[in-house]
Image (spheres, rainbow, N blue to C red):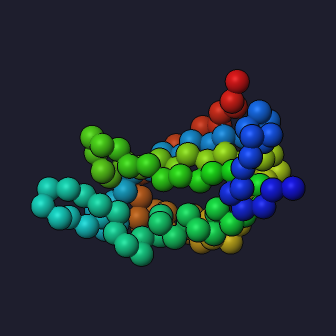
Amino acid sequence: MLTGCEINNDTIATLNPVQRIVYGASPQMLSTRGSVFRITRGSPVLGLIAPTRAEAGCINYDLHVSEEDARQFVFYENWMSESHLEAHANSAHLRAFRKMADEILDGPVEITKWRML
């Protein structure tokens, strides 16, 4: 059984739920260095990574930032099963993030689920 973000060649062929979550950051969440926006250290978004990667069933949980607009970022995540994904959705750190989402995001979150072929 996998725990955390462990993966091996046997698992790759059986990947289950993949979730793509797109966020737009509010100005309060970003710092400016010259004309480049960056998600600030200690940001609630960065705080999601370590506890999520430690969750049972997490294959990967990766944060990507748009090269065209640094206010746009995506979590790309893979889970061993739908039940692992549901447990993640109900985790304490994600519930806490959702409570502050209106303050730190500039609009609704776009969540799409994908399956590997």
**Is there any visible trace of residue 117 in the rendered image?**
yes
Q: Position of residue 86 (x, y in %)?
A: 76, 53
Can the viewer see residue 108?
Answer: no
Seen in the image, is 7 located left or right of residue 66? right
Where, quadrant-wise, is the N terminus in this rendering?
Answer: bottom right
Residue 29 image position (x, y, % from top left): 34, 66
Look at 69% across and 30% down and name the residue there. 116
Q: Quadrant of residue 16?
A: top right
Q: Residue at x 80, y 40 (%)?
A: 10
Q: Quadrant of the C terminus?
A: top right
Residue furthest to the bottom in view is: 42
Question: Residue 76: where, in percent of width, then height?
Answer: 55, 46
Q: 41 left or right of 58? A: left
Depth check: give the residue in front, 35 or 95: 35
Q: At 63% across and 69% down in the image, what residue appears?
A: 51
Asked which quadrant contains residue 53, the reply is: bottom right
